[in-house]
Amino acid sequence: MNAGILFMFSVWLQSQMVDLIVFGKNPKLIGNFVASPERVPGEVHQQRAKYWEKDFGQIKTEFLKVFANTLSSREVEDVEHVYHLRNMIGHAHVSIGRDYMLFRPGGEHREKAVLDALKPEPVKDQSNPLMFKLEFWRPDKFKAFSDLMERIDQQCFGRLAADLGVPHGRIR
């Protein structure tokens, strides 16, 4: 259940990244968007819809590019962390007979990227190839990922929205 909650929060963060990209690349759309809180202007909707066809990785890459000059290194790491978390949940091996999921990155390049981003604790007698044990049922694990997503939402995305002149509540 916690994995589903974390996955949905990652979808929510993806939606915010889309809006920030749209307004970051098209500042002329902000005025009409802010002036019409009861309805999203058609031109904003058209721009959003283009991104709904893309996956999280494509949106993350464009987001990091559009805001490269304003994101701190920690914010970049946080966004990368959510990307890997979401990918792990989406591609995990699930069994109702156990309280954890297993994940295997696709290839050495992805394995290195996941290890670099998540910095997992070493596991005694690790399998080969490497497998990640996802224990979202553990309160400490769930809280750590929830706190990460809250930090991205409130600190990073809130700041970027304010910098653009977009009320954060409108894109949340």
Image (cartoon, rainbow, N blue to C red):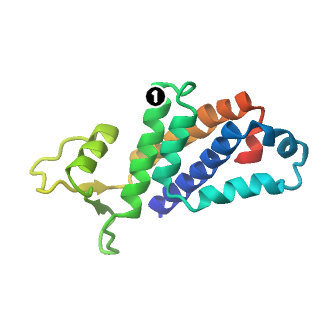
Q: Residue at x 41, y 51 (%)?
A: 85
Q: Please give left or right for residue 79 compared with residue 116 in the image.
A: right
In front here: 9 or 147?
A: 9
Q: Please give left or right for residue 135 compared with residue 17 in the image.
A: left
Q: Residue at x 34, y 39 (%)?
A: 117
In front here: 117 or 44?
A: 44
Q: How many marks?
A: 1
Q: Residue 92, located in which quarter of the rendered image?
A: bottom left
In front here: 141 or 71?
A: 71
In front here: 153 or 140?
A: 153
Give how far across and how far down residue 147 sits, in percent. 51, 40
Give how far across and how far down residue 109 sits, in percent. 24, 47
Q: Name the residue type under label 1.
A: Arg
Give how far across and how far down residue 24 sits, in percent. 67, 37
Q: Is residue 70 above or below residue 94?
A: above
Mark 1, secondary structure of its residue:
helix
Give how far across and how far down residue 143 sits, in percent. 47, 45
Q: Does residue 39 appear anywhere in the picture?
A: yes
Q: Does residue 146 appear anywhere in the picture?
A: no
Q: Is residue 53 above or below residue 35?
A: below
Q: Please give left or right for residue 89 compared with residue 56 in the image.
A: left
Which residue extends farthest bottom? 96
Q: Residues within 10 Å of mark 1 (few under 14, many from 20)?
A: few
- Residue where numbered disc 1 is placed: 74
Q: Residue at x 67, y 60 (%)?
A: 49
Q: Please give left or right for residue 82 compared with residue 135 in the image.
A: right
